[in-house]
Amino acid sequence: MWTEKLLVQGPYNFDLVLERLSLDPLQVVDFTNRTVKVPLYIEKEPIVLQVQAIGNIEEPAFIIKGHSEAYKSKAIEQLKKVFHWHQPLEGVSQHFRESDLREIFEEHRGTAIVLDFDYYSCLVKCIIHQQLNLSFAHTLTERFVKTFGYQIDGAWFYPTPETTAQLRIEQLRAIQFSGRKAEYVIGLSEQIIQGHLNLDLMANLSDQEVMDTLIKIRGIGRWTAENFLLFGLGRPNLFPKADIGIQNALKILYGLPQKPTQEEMETYSVKWAPYLSYASLYLWRSIEKRSEKK
């Protein structure tokens, strides 16, 4: 086993990152030791890393542990992108200091956008989460992964596209997928293994090119594509206006009698660019915290 210490530029609040990760029952989070297990694919090989915070918000530091020395360098580079260690958050914090979101950003200061651990699982999760409340979406995703995926060192890996493509709709309906959602997940997997969709190439495309590519696939609309851009590719300027969570957060923030219209959301968000993805994250976080307090 190898161990590496990483220093990151603050502010970075790993405890709040762990708090948000823990909403997903598939995440192996230990609050006492401030750790999370991270399942990654490096050169198509599944590996599990442990990330432990040892610093504080202003001087973040981490201990990374893994088993395979051969993949150490690439694994660390991937972790930097997943946890947003490669770009300081201070500029983001400053940008929102004089905005309508200043109080939310102060409360959640140092919360980074943490990416899903691989592109395929991100897109599958987005499809599963479509039009479901967050609690049941996590439950359904957990059933899918624990029924058809696999576990290494206590961390769960989503089933591969090859595995999912071989599933029957009835198998997914047995864990409470709708027939249509089952068709979408299986169909996506078939597109990948047949070579019609290469998710690894998405990182080289513009936001619009990714959007145009994905919405051609049955079961993927704008909301799913935007969430993939945000949590799969880590694009900084995404604001999914059709997202009910963001709509509810804005309703509370501005004391509106009803959810804002798309036009109102556009007006609110003009000054938040070019960090709309962070506006989205912190708005989500504001209502997640309200749910946790109930």
Image (cartoon, rainbow, N blue to C red):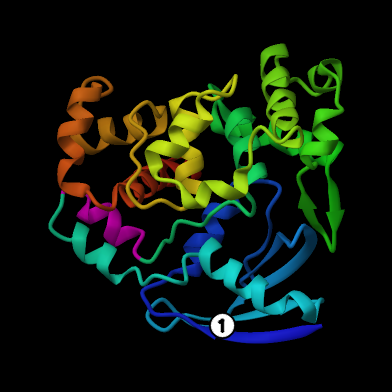
Residue drawn at 85 percent across, 59 percent down: 152
Residue 254 or 68: which is nearer the viewer?
A: 68
In the orientation shown, which residue stands out farthest toward the front? 195
- Residue 71 falls in which quadrant of the image? bottom right
Q: Main secondary structure of the magenta part?
A: helix
Q: Is residue 255 visible?
A: no
Q: Is residue 78 left or right of residue 109?
A: right
Q: Quadrant of the N terminus?
A: bottom right
Q: Is residue 286 above or below residue 261?
A: below
Residue drawn at 41 percent across, 51 percent down: 235
Q: Is residue 283 left or right of residue 131?
A: left
| Magenta-highlighted residues | 100-109
Residue 234 or 138: which is nearer the viewer?
A: 234
Q: Position of residue 110 (x, y in %)?
A: 38, 66
Q: Secondary structure at mark 1?
A: loop
- Residue 126 falls in which quadrant of the image? top right
Determine which residue is flagged by label 1.
Answer: 54
Q: Is residue 270 visible?
A: yes
Residue 19 or 267: which is nearer the viewer?
A: 267
Q: Position of residue 88 (x, y in %)?
A: 36, 72
Q: Position of residue 207 (x, y in %)?
A: 39, 42
Residue drawn at 28 percent across, 53 percent down: 275
Q: Is residue 21 above or below residue 168?
A: below
Q: Is residue 216 above or below residue 276?
A: above
The three-letter code of the residue at mark 1 reads Ile
Q: Is residue 180 left or right of residue 251?
A: right
Q: Is residue 192 magenta?
A: no
- Residue 50 falls in which quadrant of the image? bottom right
Q: Position of residue 86 (x, y in %)?
A: 45, 72
**Crowding at mark 1 (Cα within 10 Å: few <14, some 14-19, many 20+):** some
